[in-house]
Amino acid sequence: MSKLSLGVDIAGIKMRNPVMTASGTFGYGLEYSNLINIEDFGAIVTKTITLEPRIGNPQPRIVEVTGGMLNSIGLQNPGAKVFIEEKLPKLKEYGVPIIANISGSKKAEFVKLADLLSNIGLSGLELNISCPNVEHAGLFAQDADTTYKLVRKVRKATNLPLIVKLTPNVTDVTLIAGAAEDAGADAVSLINTLIGMSIDIQTKKPKLANVIGGLSGPAVKPIALRMVYEVSKKVRIPVIGMGGIMSSDDAIEFLLAGASAVAIGTANFVNPNTCCEIIEGIKTYMGNNKFNKISDIVGRVNVKKLEKLIYARSITYV
Ligand SMILES: Cc1cc2nc3c(=O)[nH]c(=O)nc-3n(C[C@H](O)[C@H](O)[C@H](O)COP(=O)(O)O)c2cc1C
């Protein structure tokens, strides 16, 4: 009998495999329940929840671009009360860990939400301090000190595993990841979307009503992978990798780079069954490579020779 196990424990969240949904790309999971086996997922991460309902940004707020999509949804959501009373009971029926992604425009809102959501059967909280589509939430993660202060406050408000979601829209993401870890985060997840823009050359207007939006999909994958690699070398807490993962090969690259789990976003719009296909693909890869457990893959990228090359090149440029 095979000893192969895909199970992972991310900061105390026990998952049957390392594949979860990325916030905002799977609704609340309920729309797909008759189509796919959601109960096979490692975890479900909800769309961002705010204290009060939000109608989001004006339309159009999604546009397809080369290699991905731009969105400026603006954290549309029904608010904490509806989430707790209507969405969560149904989500729990899948028997999969549910991680609530939360955001706010002030520290106090994050704290209040964390407190409110602490004892209602969630498996963890993901702090969205990196949304590019609302004025304040994106700014928290662009400064290490602000990140530290926010995470510290939320840490005190909840005993749930705390995942801090990082933005790629910074010069050095490892500084922000380090601040989150120092403040008591149990894991970090990255990347949120990269800020982008698209213009209709006939009307000469931006294609998004909000002018700019967040880029996601295959175009961002090399950037996300590099950031996951850098962050996982810097912090001791688990890293959840995401950004342009479309296939099991992509997911395995993130595991090799140092991610302990992966989240699937834009790919769900192309094929809602992507998570299940990725889980199967990881299983096959493990069998073919004689890996018995996910931790056998995590961080296994062999960069020794490459590091020497990068060093040599930087000398050439001096
Ligand atoms: C339409 C859309 C909505 C999103 N909404 C959220 C959100 O509410 N909260 C959040 O933290 N991230 C949100 N994201 C970001 C994703 O969770 C993910 O970090 C990002 O898209 C990169 O992964 P991907 O390239 O696999 O999509 C959203 C992304 C998309 C495309």
Image: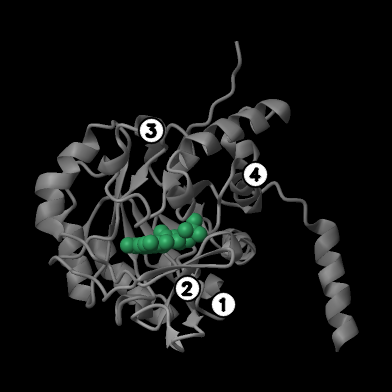
Asked if the residue at tag 1 contacts the one at tag 4, i.e. Cβ–Cβ closer than 8 Å, the answer is no
The residue labelled by disc 2 is: 176
Can residue 189 be seen from the camera position used here? no
The residue labelled by disc 1 is: 172
Asked if the residue at tag 3 contacts the one at tag 4, i.e. Cβ–Cβ closer than 8 Å, the answer is no
Asked if the residue at tag 1 contacts the one at tag 2, i.e. Cβ–Cβ closer than 8 Å, the answer is yes
Q: Position of residue 21 (x, y in %)?
A: 40, 47
Three-letter code, disc 1: Asp
- Which of labels 3 and 1 is toward the front? 3
From the viewer's perspective, is residue 141 above or below residue 159?
A: below
Three-letter code, disc 3: Ile
Task: Report whether 107 appears left or right of 9.
Answer: left
The mark that comes first in sequence, 4 or 3, is 3
The residue labelled by disc 3 is: 36
Q: Secondary structure at mark 4?
A: helix
Q: Position of residue 54 (x, y in %)?
A: 18, 68
For the residues labelled 2 and 1, the Cα–Cα distance comes to: 7 Å
From the viewer's perspective, is residue 5 above or below residue 200?
A: above
Q: Position of residue 234 (x, y in %)?
A: 58, 64
The residue labelled by disc 4 is: 249
The mark that comes first in sequence, 4 or 2, is 2
For the residues labelled 4 and 2, the Cα–Cα distance comes to: 28 Å
For the residues labelled 3 and 1, the Cα–Cα distance comes to: 38 Å
